[in-house]
Amino acid sequence: MKSVLNDIEKIVGNNNVGENISLKNFTTFKVGGPCDIFVEPEDEESLVDVYRYLNDRGIRHIIMGNGSNFFVSDEGYRGVFLKIGRKLSNIEVKGNTILAQSGATNYSIGEEAIKSGLSGFECCAGIPGTIGGAVYMNAGAYGGEISDIIQSARVLYADSNEVEEVFKEDLKLSYRNSIFHNRKGIVLSAKLILEKKDSQSVKEYTRELMDRRRRKQPLEYPSGGSFFKRPEGYYAGKLIEDSGLKGFRVGDAQISEKHCGFVINRGNATSKDLLNLRAHVVNQVFKEFGVTLEMEVRSIGEYDE
Ligand SMILES: Cc1cc2nc3c(=O)[nH]c(=O)nc-3n(C[C@H](O)[C@H](O)[C@H](O)COP(=O)(O)OP(=O)(O)OC[C@H]3O[C@@H](n4cnc5c(N)ncnc54)[C@H](O)[C@@H]3O)c2cc1C
């Protein structure tokens, strides 16, 4: 790993890379051990170069936005974490189009949409991730999702050498899914098409949906949002509650009493607590309802799936 570290330093500069970095504070779940190398490129050119480098050499790596949809194993991750964050978060508004670099947060895009009187992003503004992560997950809430507003994304696929503009149809967006689950690639930026409206009404709707989150979701605890995907025809939270698992706890991992679809970290939850809790919940819900719950949150590291 020493030679990999040296090579990466040459690409991104030694201020933008570290060794043996704890991932706990880089995820909203606040769970996880260290990765071997953590790199946060400060411009698109070095991001592209380092991504090509990792793929060309077959070096194990994970792309990370805001870390709001995964937790890392207690033993950490043997490989490279490639963080796309504040340094790559430019947002440009032109007419009714927003062009956002992949590290731009949904919150900041929502604020730009308010300023510019653009409607359509209100449902996503409270999702605590980056637009890159939102495209990967086809994130959404309150009846809307990224697929409703995205026109295209600039992408570098791992199996290609070229940065290309990929249009919506080819991003294969469906419920919490995109082409990137089957074809490895990095989203560099996204182009969103919104609708002109008055700024005040966009602001009011955005704030209303944020308030709804605060009222219904256990935002006072670390979590990864909805822990399980919505099984067709059901709501995961309701199945869990009706299985008598409200407040069910393994170590410091707990089914939220406020919203059974959320698993929260009561302080010092470990990845083992989370996975043991998952196993119990999946078993119980299957016994009660014959429905198999699937995790929406990703677990990374020793427990790679
Ligand atoms: C309190 C809370 C509420 C939430 N509410 C919602 C909600 O209402 N709706 C919803 O859909 N989700 C919700 N989530 C889950 C999460 O915020 C979303 O899935 C979000 O889109 C993840 O973005 P991120 O930047 O944090 O991605 P990360 O968690 O960092 O990464 C998620 C996945 O995307 C990949 N990825 C990230 N960036 C890129 C990129 N640039 N190119 C390619 N791949 C990339 C990663 O490799 C990883 O597989 C919630 C989470 C929390 C903690």
Image (spheres, rainbow, N blue to C red):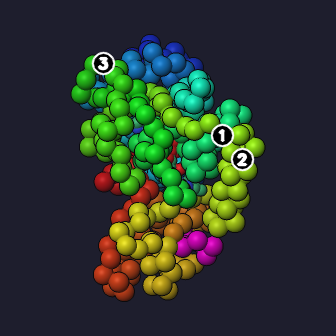
Dot 1: element = loop
- Eyeballing the image, is 137 above or below 64? below
Give the residue at x 48% y 19%: 44
- Eyeballing the image, is 23 above or below 51? below
Give the residue at x 51% y 53%: 144
- What's drawn in magenta, residue-wise? 253-260
Residue denoted by label 3: 162
Instruction: Estimate the x, y position of residue 15 in percent, counting from the top left.
Output: 57, 20
Tell me the CA gap for discs 3 and 2: 41 Å
Residue denoted by label 1: 197
Residue denoted by label 2: 201
Give the residue at x 38% y 80%: 285
Dot 3: element = loop
Instruction: Estimate the x, y position of residue 58 in percent, counting from the top left.
Output: 26, 29
Q: Please identify the dominant SS of the magenta region.
A: loop
Residue 256 among those drawn in magenta: yes
